[in-house]
Every structure is written in C-alpha cells, then in structure tokens.
Image (tube, rainbow, N blue to C red):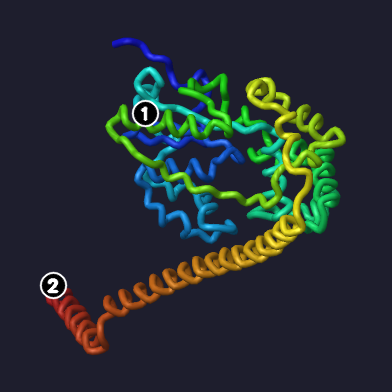
Amino acid sequence: MTAHTPLLNGINPPGNSFVVRDLKIVYMSVTKAACTSLRWMIADLAGEDLDMFPRTLGAQQSRLMTIHGARWRWQRTPQLGQLAPEELAEISVDNGWFVFAVVRDPWSRIWSAWQSKFLVRHNYYEGYRDEPWYPSVATSQEQVIKDFRTFLEARPWLSDPQLSTDVHFLPQVVSVRPQGVNYSRIYDLRDLGTLFDDLKAHLASVGRPVQELYVPRANETPLPLIPAVLADGVADIILELYADDFTAFGDRWDRDELMRGDASWTDDAIASAAYQTTANERINDLSKQARDFRKQLRHAKAEVRNLRRELELVHDAQARRPSARVRRRAARVRHELAGRLRSRRVER
C-alpha cells in the first residue's frame, strides 16, 4: 500500500473540525470568515436535519445564526477527535479527501467581530458593561469609530480569562493551524467562488454531483468597514495585534484596497446598528428567561420523579403488609404451635 500524507502533523484533532464521512470532506471552521454560511453548507451536504438547529434557547438574532448552537445537534457530522484512530489515519488529501479552511484579512475580521459581539450585543457577554472599553449604543460615526479604537487599545482579549480563549478575537492561525494540518487548500474569503467550484468538482469525483450548493448569507454587522475606521494608526495597531496571521497569509491582503471603500455610513446605517443593539439586548433577556424556565422545569421533573419513587415504595410496603385478619390468624397459629411445643416437652 502506498503511504499517504497524514492529515495532522503531530497535533491533537482540532475541535473546530466538521467531517462529512461519505463525501470525504473536512472543513476547519474559522469565526468571522463566512463560517455561518459554510456551516449551513456542510450541514446540508452531510444530510443533517436542518430544522434541528433553530430549536434552541440561545440568544441568536436569527434562524441562520442558530447553526452556532450546541454541537450535539450535529448528528451526522463528527469532529475529527470523535473518529476512531484507524478512521482518522485514513483521512488524507492523497486518499481523495477535500480538506479546507477559509481565512479573512484581520482588518475587516476584527471589525466584524467587535461590531457583532460588543457594539450590537449579539449573543455575548454582558459582564463587561462597566469596562471603559465597552461601547455605547451607536449614535454617530465618530462615536462608533472612537469606541472601536478604545477597544483595540485596551486589548482585553490578551488579559481577560474569558476573552483570552475566544476565537473571535484570536489570530486565525489558532483555528486554522496551517503547520499542523495538511489541507487541500486554505481559501481567502474573497475566493469563495473558487472554493465552491473546487468543492463541486470534488463532489463529482465521489459520485455526488450538485448544481447548486446551499450557502445562505448571514450578515449580523450593519456597518461595513470604511477607511475612517482604519485611519489614525488603527490599521497599524491591527497589523501588530495579528502579526501571526499576516506572517502566515499576509500576501493575500491589500490594505490600500480596503481604504478605497465608502467614505461614511448613512444615518440609516447608524440607526440600524442602534436598533440591532436594543433588539439583541431584548433577545438576550428572553433567552435568559427561557434558560431559567428550563432549569426550573428540570428541577420540577426531578421532584416529580422523587415523589413517584416514594409513592411506589409506599405502595410496595402496603402490598407486602398483611391484612388485620391475616395477622390475627398468624398469631393464633403461632400460639397453637407454642402450646404444642410446651405439651411435647412435658410429655418427655
């Protein structure tokens, strides 16, 4: 048997992996790099029950965002770490597997992450409200840009225990592991068309040709990146913060291209951001209440189970306990037996 290049180069199987066994696909998910759309695509190809994902009590702002809920809802798409060692050993580009990830320029990626998770409060931490870098509800372009810069300068994900493990703010190399995984290709976000063409060719090679892929578009960031966001040294701050990404993939990205966008946001865009913030805060409120109700329901069900067990014990005890008539009869029998025994001892 010809030796093949292993999938992993001395690293543990990544948890952000999605394996479609019968189609020989491995997708390594990267947050804020079309991961919502790509997860739906993978779920559809794997034959997952797509209606399962919206059945969640999470604070996702739309049905499309529920694809990021609990991983147990994925019944047909395991992680690499859930495979048997011999099955994992057979996954290789040399064996006809299509292994891919998608990355994005760090300038627009951190802007999208901050806007989604903090500015519009999409399903995120409320425990930071008193931090000086926590943004206000959007009221003007100047205020939003100032709040973003304050966040970058504070760099809370480098010190805060919770944020320090949040891949939304970590370099993409943490998720992609370019030296630890042998990919078919690592695509850039701008090259999704090429990715889809390559994936269709792969599907045809494994006997599953498709005309169209299911790739719904989800955009939870109402304010597009404009040159003003990166002005006054902000672009250089990001360049420093994500040096590892620029070292690994930097030849793909052109800062000047990003600086050629629209000059400003419309008043409607600012209003939309403010509306999303207040709406998401209410969604978070309702989600917390729903989780509390579910917790109360679990406790109530546990109490019902305990009461039923106690009731069964009482019934069993009553069933084993003889009636008064039987007890009287047993007493007479015991008395008669005792009398006979005494008589026999006297006779002896």
Residue 221 point in image, percent of width and height: 66, 50
Where residue 160 appears, as percent x and y from the top left, is 75, 41
Q: Is residue 215 above or below residue 127?
A: above
**Residue extending furthest top?**
2
Numbered circles on residues, count: 2
For this rendering, which residue is in front, 83 or 299?
Answer: 83
Instruction: Check contact, mark 2 vs mark 1: CB within 8 A.
Output: no
Residue at the image position 17 percent from the left and 76 percent from the top: 341
Q: Amino acid at mark 1?
A: His
Q: Residue at x 47, y 58 (%)?
A: 54
Examine the rendered structure and indicate whether residue 146 appears above or below residue 269: above
Let me know if residue 173 appears in the view: yes
Q: On residue 348, which mark appears?
A: 2
Image location of residue 145, percent across then percent down: 82, 46
- Measure the alpha-carbon separation of dots 2 and 1: 102 Å
Numbered mark located on residue 202 in the image: 1
Quadrant for the N terminus in the image? top left
Which three-letter amino acid code belongs to the residue tagged 2? Answer: Arg
Q: Position of residue 219 (x, y in %)?
A: 60, 49
Q: Quadrant of residue 24?
A: top left
Among the two numbered marks 2 and 1 on one chain, the one whose residue lies closer to the N terminus = 1
Q: Quadrant of residue 93?
A: top left
The quarter holding residue 20 reads top left
